[in-house]
Amino acid sequence: MLCAPPDYAESHVADTDHPFAGLVSRLEANQTLSREDREALLHLPNKLRQLDPGTYIVREGDRPRACGVLISGFAYRQKVTGDGARQIIGLHVPGEALDFQNLFLEVSDHNVQMLTRGEIAEVPIEAFQKIALERPNVGRAILVTTLVEASVFREWVLNIGRRDSRSRLAHLLCEFALRLEAGGAARPDHGYELPMTQEQLADATGLTPVHVNRVLKMLEAEGLIVRNRRHISFPDWHRLRDVGDFNQRYLHVRDRATNGVF
């Protein structure tokens, strides 16, 4: 058995209360895991960290040493141009691993930051490498998870490159709703607390904050969204999907996770 380094601790609480319960559930959505596989994941050495918004979890140019699992809060991937312009290239919700993409790479080529205040469990990179190589079901689940992330990146390229501003924003709101729904955190008919500022929405859609504000007001005037501070709901979900040119196929979410809403 892999021994935990001095700063890491193994937890032995019930699966449903375990920090890695969400991770196991998400991996098992991609590949059937045995009881032994699940136990091995739950007993990965880890160190819990409470992080503030904006805290870097992965920095471009650094050698990967740990892979964080998001326990609570939200995180995002981003890259910065030479003159400092930021492009957000992906979002992460609770239960997701934040750095499977660097699991077998020598250096990180992008950044991961906390979007909100939250908690992560840091797992030594060698521990994830070991379980991926020694347990084929876990290894396949990690591979499929990484392939789905690549699929999401393709959709984001299409969103920024070919959809108009109204469709871009509607598409992002739809994606976030489905990913929260898949994790059991929200339903689109009830809406959710949008954790992104207008500046962050702008960096994710290739727009300016002023343009984002104008588009949100447009969607609101059309009866497609209702906003109450950060809470956002969707009176006409199917029409919003049409406006956003949204097809969830690229997320590869099994039907059982959508409860028929989508």
Image: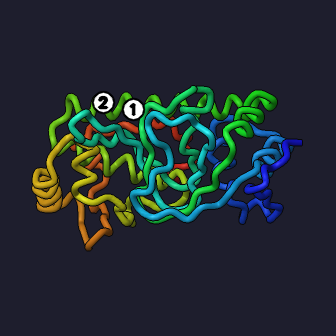
Residue 262 seen from this side: no
The residue depicted at 74 percent of the width and 40 percent of the height is 127
Q: Nearer the viewer, residue 224 or 199?
A: 199
Left or right: 59 in relation to 164: right
In the rendered view, tell whether residue 237 sits above or below residue 125. below
The residue depicted at 77 percent of the width and 39 percent of the height is 33
Where residue 27 sits in the image (x, y, percent)?
Answer: 65, 41
The amino acid on which the numbered mark 1 sits, given as a three-letter code, is Phe
In three-dimensional space, the C-alpha distance between marks 2 and 1, rounded to whole angstroms, equals 6 Å
The amino acid on which the numbered mark 2 sits, given as a three-letter code, is Val
Where residue 148 sits in the image (x, y, percent)?
Answer: 51, 32
Say which quarter of the image contains residue 187.
bottom left
* Label of residue 153 in the image: 1
The residue depicted at 41 percent of the width and 62 percent of the height is 53
Say which quarter of the image contains residue 89.
top left
Q: Nearer the viewer, residue 199 or 194?
A: 199
The residue lying furthest to the bottom in this view is 228
Where residue 119 sits in the image (x, y, percent)?
Answer: 56, 62
Left or right: 85 in relation to 211: right
The residue lying furthest to the right in this view is 1
* Label of residue 157 in the image: 2
Q: Are marks 2 and 1 in contact (CB under 8 Å)?
A: yes
Say which quarter of the image contains residue 229.
bottom left
Q: Nearer the viewer, residue 237 or 144?
A: 144
Residue 142 seen from this side: yes
* Label of residue 165 in the image: none
Q: Secondary structure at mark 2?
A: helix
For disc 1, the neighbor class at 10 Å (few under 14, some 14 to 19, many from 20) is some
In the rendered view, tell whether residue 62 sits above or below residue 262. above
For disc 2, the neighbor class at 10 Å (few under 14, some 14 to 19, many from 20) is few
In the rendered view, tell whether residue 144 sits above or below residue 174. above
